[in-house]
Image: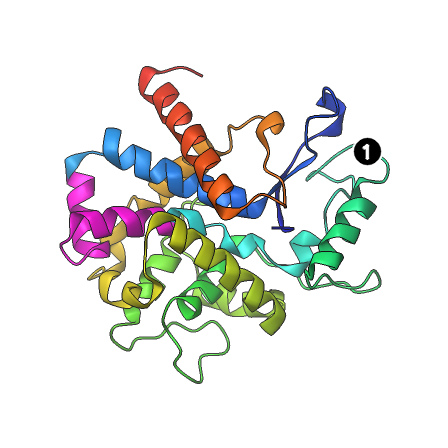
Amino acid sequence: MWCWGRLHRSGTRRGPAVRSWNPLAAELLGSSAVMLRLWDRALPQAQQAMLIASLGAGDREAARRVSAFLAGTSRLGEANPARMDRFSLGDDEFPEPRPGEREAWREGALKAGLPLPSPEERPYRAAPEHITAAVLPRLIGCGCEGLTDGEQCFQQPHRGLFRAAFALNSHRGARLHDDDVGKAQRATGGAAWDTVRADLVNLVASSVGVTPRRLPELIQPPEPSTLSGFDRLVAQCNRLASHASPSRFASPTDSPTELWEASQQQAQEAVTRQIQGSP
């Protein structure tokens, strides 16, 4: 809960009730909730059919929930030491930080057990989508040995997990390259951060009603191209979920139930605005 997802620019803040940062966990759930709402209200039948075949083993409800799970975990790679260490550094990520914000967040995160790098460390950086592709399949079913450098596993039924993870490149529009995913292993932060990411995966899975051990049998796109367009759908979910105002940012002390209920409410509002053509 102390991984940050979005930071509010302090120069536009109004009043003490507005939080400076939103937990990444809340934003993952927000994307999942938007996917469920889009599926129910706006997803074309042809796209549903493709996802039912690729992510649900022919079961509509399973595909609906797995799609929501993947939309939520598409930003899992943001939970890495280099990105977390950039909280409120006054760069393009978060200009004009309010004095003391970074220190207060870091103190709370360390107290909660987040394995942040020490101030003198310079952790390796990689694009979050590459980290997601490197770590997600191993957190949802592929435990095959010898795949330590981000290589794809071609064993059944794990092949589909990698195809789906590579299809979550939601904002660059090009297929991820195996070499870039392999290099991203250096930026994952190791076992301590795997534990953090596993907690986030389990939070999303339990919220959307997915059983992680069933994912390898459900996620079986026959070819990488089968999920063509899924990245744009995931990007849409992430964009709509990001529209919550800072006054509605979650707190790191919120319970999973509180996070999910708030995410569902915000998703309903965001998708309704999208359908009605409102900004």
Q: Position of residue 241 (x, y in %)?
A: 46, 34
Residue 55 in sight here: yes
Residue 34 left/right relative to 134 = left
- What residue lies at 38% left-to-right and 59% top-to-bottom? 165
Residue 161 left/right relative to 194 = left
**Picture quadrant where residue 176 is located:** bottom left
Residue 171 in sight here: no
Callout 1 amino acid = Arg
Is residue 185 shown in magenta? Answer: no
Region of the chain picked out in magenta, as a range: 46-70
Coloured how?
A: rainbow
Query: What kind of element bears circle 1?
Result: loop
- What residue lies at 18% left-to-right and 50% top-to-bottom? 52
Q: Residues within 10 Å of mark 1 (few under 14, many from 20)?
A: few
- What residue lies at 53% left-to-right and 28% top-to-bottom? 244
Is residue 47 shown in magenta? Answer: yes
- What residue lies at 25% left-to-right and 54% top-to-bottom? 225
**Where is mark 1, residue-wise?**
98
In-front residue for pair 267/240: 267
Q: Position of residue 125 (x, y in %)?
A: 65, 59
Residue 74 left/right relative to 56 = right
- Dominant secondary structure (helix, strand or loop) of the stretch shown in magenta: helix
